[in-house]
Image (cartoon, rainbow, N blue to C red):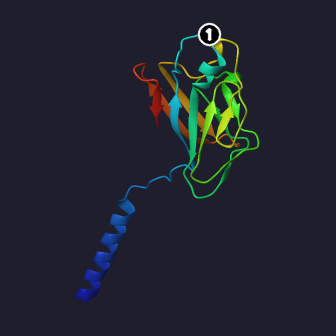
């Protein structure tokens, strides 16, 4: 009888300890890994080379390809022209895609926001901002904030 009580008490203590462990959310399959917000040579007049020096990088953290069609990247403003929506695009397992602000030819590793038109074409503020990554349903998948004018980029 005493052995049974001791076993029961031990099992009960183990189940309470297991339940008390903190729950960790699974890391997102796609993460924002870097924002280069102060492109080389800026401030300038929004030359395409400078706009493309400003970018955000996304990495597929899984061993499976992720279809990013309909996913969005945006900054902290509520401006509709500060939202990039992925068209047909698949990010391969373990790979990174760089989303550049200016114009260029899209590839499997680089996408272009397609912005032009001077200094107002930049997306990322030079001192502080937040990048948000959302899936097609609008669910927030990842975000990365920075608040510094001492560096040109933030590793997330």
Say above or below: 143 vs 45.
Answer: below
What residue is disc 1 on? 45
Q: Is residue 2 left or right of residue 36?
A: left
- As drawn, 46 above or below 145: above
Q: In the figure, 101 relative to 64: above or below? A: above
Question: What is the residue that sits farthest to the left in this orientation?
Answer: 2
Residue 48 placement: quadrant: top right
Q: How many marks?
A: 1
Q: Look at 68% across and 35% down and name the residue there.
A: 111
Q: Residue 60: percent from the left, percent from the top? A: 58, 49
Camera-nearest residue between 52 and 148: 52
Does 21 sit left or right of 9 as displayed?
right
128 with respect to 11 (left or right): right
Q: Residue furthest right?
A: 88
The residue nearer to you, when weighing 106 against 28, is 106
In this rendered view, identify the residue nearer to me: 23 or 136: 136
Vertical comparison of 16 with 109: above or below: below
Question: Which residue appears at 23% of the width and 87% of the height?
Answer: 2
In the displayed orientation, state which residue is furthest to the top: 45
Circle 1 crowding by C-alpha within 10 Å: few under 14, some 14–19, many from 20: some
Residue at 44% x, 54% y is 24
Q: Position of residue 82 (x, y in %)?
A: 66, 24
Residue at x 58% of width, y 48% of height: 95
Residue 25, percent from left and from top: 48, 52
Looking at the image, which is closer to me, 18 or 155? 155
Query: At numbered mark 1, what does the secondary structure look like: helix, strand or loop?
Result: loop
Quadrant of residue 120 within the rendered picture = top right
């Amino acid at each position: 009888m005493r052995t049974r009580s001791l076993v029961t008490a031990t099992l009960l203590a183990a189940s309470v300890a297991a339940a008390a462990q903190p729950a960790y959310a699974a890391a997102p399959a796609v993460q924002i890994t870097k924002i280069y917000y102060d492109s080389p040579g800026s401030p300038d007049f929004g030359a395409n080379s400078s706009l493309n020096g400003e970018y955000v990088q996304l990495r597929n953290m899984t061993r499976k390809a992720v279809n990013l069609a309909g996913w969005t990247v945006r900054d902290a403003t509520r401006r509709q022209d500060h939202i990039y929506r992925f068209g047909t695009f698949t990010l391969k397992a373990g790979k990174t895609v760089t989303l550049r602000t200016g114009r260029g030819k899209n590839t499997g590793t680089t996408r272009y926001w397609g912005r032009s038109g001077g200094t107002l074409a930049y997306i990322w503020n030079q001192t502080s901002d937040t990048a948000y990554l959302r899936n097609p349903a609008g669910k927030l998948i990842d975000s990365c904030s920075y608040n510094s004018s001492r560096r040109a980029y933030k590793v997330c």
